[in-house]
Image (tube, grey):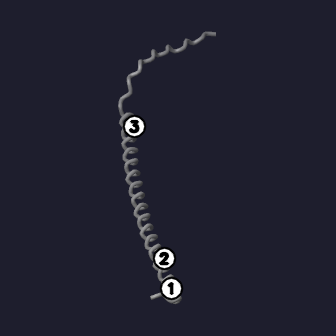
């Protein structure tokens, strides 16, 4: 049974609408995937930031410990004798 012109036009319109709906579905799925990727990136950067803060604190503590260590004793310089007074 051959299709009439009206039926053919309706089939083309329905097919086009189905393609548009499918494309929108794919776009929504891609958008959700991108949101998940963004959330994962944010989570990863927070972890990296926490680790950096830990290492910075550790370095500050090490510097403080190094400052507390007693310095090596330096050789004592001989004391100068007071200058003699000149007579006029």
Mark sitting earlier along the chain (2/3): 2
- Quarter of the figure with residue 62: top left
Mark sitting earlier along the chain (3/1): 1
Q: Nearer the viewer, residue 56 or 11?
A: 11
> Which label was assigned to residue 20?
2
> Which label was assigned to residue 63?
3
Image x and y of residue 82, in percent: 51, 15
Of circles 3 and 1, the one toward us is 1
- Measured in 3D between alpha carbons, the distance from the residue under mark 3 to the one under mark 1, in whole angstroms, is 82 Å
Quadrant the C terminus occupies: top right
Q: Residues within 10 Å of mark 2 (few under 14, many from 20)?
A: few
Is 83 left, or right, of 75 in this rendering?
A: right
Q: Residue at x 47, y 80 (%)?
A: 15
SS label for mark 1: helix
Quadrant the N terminus occupies: bottom left
Image x and y of residue 25, in percent: 43, 73
Of circles 2 and 3, the one toward us is 2
SS label for mark 2: helix
Q: Residues within 10 Å of mark 1 (few under 14, many from 20)?
A: few
- Measured in 3D between alpha carbons, the distance from the residue under mark 2 to the one under mark 3, in whole angstroms, is 64 Å
Q: Nearer the viewer, residue 2 or 66?
A: 2
Q: Is 47 above or below relative to 26?
A: above
Of circles 1 and 2, the one toward us is 1
SS label for mark 3: helix
- Quarter of the figure with residue 65: top left
Q: Residue at x 47, y 87 (%)?
A: 2
Q: Which residue is mark 1?
A: 8
């Amino acid at each position: 049974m051959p299709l009439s012109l009206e039926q053919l036009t309706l089939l083309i319109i329905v097919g086009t609408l189905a393609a548009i709906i499918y494309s929108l579905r794919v776009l929504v799925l891609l958008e959700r995937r991108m949101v998940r990727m963004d959330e994962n990136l944010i989570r990863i950067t927070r972890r990296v930031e926490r680790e950096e803060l830990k290492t910075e604190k550790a370095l500050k503590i090490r510097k403080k410990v190094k400052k507390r260590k007693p310095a090596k004793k330096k050789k004592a310089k001989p004391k100068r004798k007071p200058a003699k007074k000149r007579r006029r």
